[in-house]
C-alpha cells in the first residue's frame, strides 16, 4: 500500500508498506483479523516481512492448527519456548483476540479489559527537508486538533529545528523521536533539548540499550522514553530499576502481542511509569488493535493512532478510522469494531496462503487480482 506522503526517520524513508494480514477462521465461522507490523527491511527490528512469513509458514501456524484455544492468553503460552520473533507471534495472537471478542459479542477493548470510551490521538511527523516544511506540517496537525506532536530528529536535524517549532508553538505538547540516532558522546547536545519543555525524547540511544539510557537520563531533565529496547516486561522491569526511562512506548508487535502488552502495562502502572501506544504505519486493522489496547487505564499519554486518512489514500477497513479534535471514539461493535473493506483488500493483495484444518498450505499468487476466500 502506498503512503500518501513519504515518512522519513533517522534510518530510512518509507513511501509504501508491504504488509502481512492474517485471517483466522474459527470452527463456528467467526473470522479474526490481524496485521504484522514487520517492515520490508530490518531497520526498526531484526524481523522483516520475509522472515515473519517464514516463521508463520514453517513453525507458528503448524503449531497452532488444530489446537483448541479457550482464551487468547494461551497463544503466548503455546509459543513461550520460541525466542523473540515477537512480531510474528503478535500477528497470530491478534487474530485470536479479534475472534475471541467476536464470538462473545464484545468489542475488543471490552474483551481485553479496557476502561475508556475515547482515546486521545497524537501524530508522528517524519523528518522534513526544511524547517519551513516542518512548521507547515506541525501547523496543520495543531489545526486538526491532535493532542500531541511527535517529530523525528537525528544529528544535524535537531536543536535548531526544535527551537523553530517551539518558537511558533510555545504551548503545544511536543516530543521528539530519535530512533537510536545518538550516543553518549552526544550528551552535551541532548542537554540542550532541556530548554524546549519536551514531553519526552524517545529512544535517543542504541536500539538494544538500557544501561546507557540510565546514564543519559541522569544527565538531562527531559524524560527519556524507551521504545526499541523494550521487548518484554522483564526488559521494562530492568530499565525502571536502573532509572533508564520515565516513560515507555508499548507496541504490540514489538512485545509479542496484546497479552504481553497488558502485562507490560500493568508493570508500568505499578511503578508509576506512564505508557502510550506507538505506531508502525499500520492499516486500519492494526490501528484498531492499537485503539483497543489504548483503552487500558495507564495509557495516559496520546498515542500514534492517527486517522486512516493521515497515511493512506484508501484503507482496508470500513468505515475508515476518523477522529474529532484529537479524540477517537472507541468502537463498540464486536471484535476490532470495523468491517473489512473486502474489495480494497482483494485489490491490494499480491499473494495468499491458506492453511485448512489439516495444516497443509495452499499458496497462490494473485497476479490476476482474483480474490480467494477460505471455505
Image (spheres, rainbow, N blue to C red):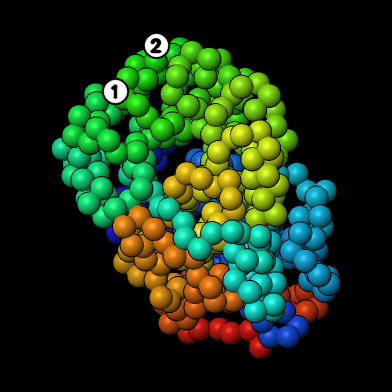
The image position of residue 106, as x and y in percent, is 63, 74
Q: Is residue 367 above or below residue 299?
A: below
198 with respect to 22 (left or right)? left
Using a 10 Å C-alpha cutoff, classify the residue at mark 2 as few (fewer than 14 neighbours), some (14 to 19) or many (20 or more).
Answer: few
Q: Quadrant of residue 373?
A: bottom right
**Residue closest to the far bottom:** 375
| Residue that mark 1 sits on | 159
Can residue 2 be seen in the rendering of this structure? no
Q: Is residue 218 above or below residue 69?
A: above
373 with respect to 221 (left or right)? right
Q: Quadrant of residue 97?
A: bottom right
The image position of residue 167, as x and y in percent, is 20, 29
> Which of 235/13 is in front?
235
The image position of residue 312, as x and y in percent, is 35, 63
Alpha-carbon span between mark 2 and mark 1: 12 Å
Q: Is residue 255 above or below residue 116?
A: above
| Residue that mark 2 sits on | 188
Query: Residue at point 34% right, 38% down?
Result: 173
The image position of residue 79, as x and y in percent, is 79, 54
Quadrant location, the C terminus: bottom right
Amino acid at each position: 500500500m502506498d503512503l500518501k506522503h513519504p515518512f522519513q526517520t533517522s534510518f530510512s524513508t518509507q513511501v509504501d508498506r508491504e504488509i502481512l494480514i492474517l485471517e483466522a477462521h474459527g470452527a463456528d465461522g467467526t473470522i479474526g483479523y490481524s496485521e504484522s507490523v514487520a517492515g520490508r527491511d530490518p531497520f526498526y527490528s531484526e524481523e522483516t516481512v520475509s522472515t515473519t512469513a517464514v516463521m508463520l509458514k514453517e513453525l507458528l501456524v503448524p503449531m497452532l492448527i488444530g489446537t483448541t484455544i479457550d482464551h487468547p492468553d494461551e497463544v503466548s503460552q503455546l509459543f513461550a519456548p520460541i525466542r523473540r520473533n515477537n512480531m510474528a507471534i503478535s500477528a497470530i495472537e491478534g487474530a485470536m483476540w479479534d475472534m475471541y471478542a467476536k464470538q462473545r459479542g464484545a468489542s475488543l477493548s471490552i474483551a481485553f479489559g479496557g476502561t475508556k470510551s475515547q482515546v486521545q490521538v497524537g501524530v508522528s511527523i517524519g523528518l522534513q527537508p526544511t524547517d519551513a516544511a516542518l512548521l507547515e506540517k506541525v501547523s496543520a496537525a495543531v489545526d486538526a486538533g491532535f493532542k500531541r506532536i511527535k517529530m523525528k530528529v537525528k544529528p544535524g536535524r535537531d536543536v535548531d529545528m526544535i527551537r523553530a517549532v517551539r518558537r511558533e508553538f510555545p504551548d503545544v505538547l511536543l516530543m521528539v523521536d530519535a530512533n537510536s540516532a545518538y550516543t553518549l558522546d552526544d550528551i552535551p547536545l541532548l542537554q540542550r533539548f532541556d530548554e524546549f519543555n519536551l514531553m519526552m525524547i524517545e529512544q535517543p540511544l542504541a536500539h538494544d540499550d538500557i544501561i546507557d539510557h540510565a546514564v543519559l537520563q541522569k544527565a538531562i531533565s527531559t524524560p527519556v522514553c524507551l521504545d526499541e529496547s523494550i521487548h518484554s516486561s522483564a526488559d521494562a522491569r530492568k530499565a525502571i530499576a536502573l532509572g533508564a526511562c520515565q516513560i515507555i512506548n508499548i507496541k504490540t508487535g514489538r512485545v509479542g502481542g496484546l497479552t504481553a502488552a497488558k502485562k507490560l502495562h500493568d508493570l508500568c502502572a505499578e511503578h508509576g511509569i506512564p505508557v502510550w501506544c506507538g505506531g508502525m504505519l499500520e492499516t486500519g486493522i492494526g490501528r484498531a488493535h492499537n485503539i483497543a489496547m489504548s483503552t487500558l487505564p495507564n495509557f495516559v499519554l496520546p498515542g500514534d493512532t492517527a486517522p486512516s486518512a493521515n497515511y493512506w489514500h484508501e484503507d482496508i477497513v470500513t468505515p475508515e478510522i476518523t477522529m474529532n479534535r484529537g479524540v477517537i471514539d472507541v468502537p463498540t461493535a464486536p471484535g476490532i469494531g470495523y468491517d473489512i473493506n473486502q474489495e480494497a483488500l482483494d485489490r491490494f493483495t499480491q499473494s495468499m496462503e491458506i492453511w485448512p484444518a489439516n495444516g497443509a498450505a495452499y499458496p497462490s499468487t494473485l497476479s490476476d487480482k482474483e480474490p480467494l476466500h477460505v471455505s
